[in-house]
Amino acid sequence: MPMTCVDHGPFACHEDGCPSTMITCYALAARLSACNLNFGEIWKVGLPDGIQVDQPVHHQCAASCSRCTADELRATVAVSEPRRWPWPSALQPVESVFAHNMSAAALAHRIAIAGTVGPLIIRQAYGEAFFRPEAWSREALRNRCAPTAPPAPPWPTIAYREPAAIGKRWAGLHFDNGAAQGVRDLVSLIDAQDAGRLRGVVLFDSPANRTCPPVLLRANVEDNERHKLLDSLPAPRFFPRDFEVVLGSEGLWRKGGAPMDDPDLFVSKAGTQTHVHIDAHCTRFWMLGLSGRKLWRVLPPDEVSNLAPSRNDKGGEHFLADVLDPTAEANADVGAQLGSVGRLFEFELAPGDLVLIPEGWPHAVHNLDDTVALTYNFVDEANLECYVRSLRAHVGKLLVKLVSQLAQGRGRQDAADAFSQHTALAYYEHLSEHVARRSPRHRSGLGGAASTTVAPVDSILEEHIPWDTFAARQHQHAAGHERGTASQRVRARLLALMESGPLTAEPVEALLDRFDAWSSARGAAKEEL
Ligand SMILES: O=C(O)CCC(=O)C(=O)O
């Protein structure tokens, strides 16, 4: 009879029926570079020094780290090797191009339709002009990223995998700011990762602007600062548009951030993983590999039902299925669903290559080596309509707040004056107009379900541009929304809403429909003229 292992915890990974000596996650991670190793495999590799066994070790005894202390988790990595996808017929090739082999129009079109056809790899995206592999090693980062002044919390932002969070939290990760883990800056995180103390902790989506400023190429630096910008990266010419930049700290994606708080840096040790997830608010993103290889598994949105989706108490969607370890015991209950996956895109991202992950596509990552990467989430013409629907939900929250203030006796004019100052409301007004002005085959109506079939195309640029130039251009594009005209229209909208009937008992969807109706009515009036 095989022995069954039961993890009684509470802290060290001691398995009933397995060797009586405690084997902690830390010991496994530090000595074998793996946590969830099967005891049979440990037996083959050899037990860590000082650990005795008093009976044969059985293959069925899996050492689970699910009850380890947070300290142990932070020191561990989940698995040493990604498991192969056991259903090869589902595997799809990923399109990979060299930008100089394609016309600008063809490349722009491929980028625009990514949401329908899938990820795109642009090989050697910056060419040799900007990308030298030696500038991105951990050692090089230690030199280049040494802070002149420690960044203020919440930067750098870090995350580590928490088995108990799978299916409950975004990407199964626990997020923290570096300061909470004794990490002052990127250099001290790299040291703690290498020493093993924070081996399983990843520098995750940490604003490059704050974490390692020389990473970003800027136009407006003093000449005597320019030498520091050697090996700095400009904004890639393939993605000239980001509607979100304008919202700054009111943005959905960059909550609390400044306009240049994206792009973000990732610095990870080999073996760390990011569980399958979807990026929020319909954003698409690119990731540029800078050092080491990352294994990606990416699925089309219509595969979501095969990933054992669950809703957390905040209404977000999370996935129980582990696409990086499809045959894991922990996956037993959802394995059958995973077996129904019809299409899965798998690829390795290598240094110098950039991948575009489309909006709404679930994806997971396993770091095959120690890796460094730069990433940027954005909203261009292709995902704008979906993004505006997300922004609409945010507007709904503001309307609910407005109604509650009216109920408490705030005057209508006063409330309209105050709420029309919210950048998010003015920008929603501006973007709704922008979407409405697009040709009918590019729009589907903001309140309803998406039905757009033809993605509007953003033209790509001839050259890469400094990041501050990129940000300034986004503001120029959106000049019409800036304080003044759009907020005056919002004020008129709010007053019309308040005069259109009682509001207190209205569900938020009805409030939004009444708020939106103002611009449809205005559009119709314009057409009559
Ligand atoms: O590189 C990683 O570990 C995860 C990247 C990712 O999935 C994301 O930024 O959404």
Image: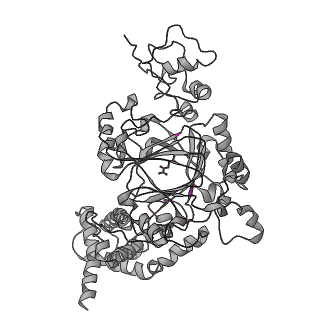
The magenta-colored residue range is: 251-272
In the image: residue 125, left or right of residue 401: right
Residue 205 in percent (x, y) is at 54, 52
Image x and y of residue 100, in percent: 55, 66
The residue closer to the viewer here, 229 or 300, is 300
Residue 86: image location, x then y, percent: 38, 35
Name the residue: 49% across, 18% down.
40
In the rendered view, would you say 130 is above or below 458? above
User: Overall secondary structure of the magenta stretch?
Assistant: loop
Decide whether residue 445 is among the magenta residues: no
Give the quadrant of the C terminus: bottom left
Please report the residue visible at 44 percent of the width from the left and 13 percent of the height from the top. 17
Q: Quadrant of residue 387?
A: bottom left
Question: Relative to 311, is 279 above or below?
Answer: below
**The N terminus, quarter of image:** top left
Query: Looking at the image, which residue is at 56% across and 49% down?
Result: 350
Residue 269 included in the magenta stretch of the image: yes
Q: Residue furthest right?
A: 224
Percent x, y for residue 280? 41, 55
Pick the front one: 63 or 297 = 297
Name which quarter of the figure residue 389 lies in. bottom left
Write the residue at 55% across / 68% down: 237
Q: Is residue 384 above or below residue 67?
A: below
Q: How many marks?
A: 0
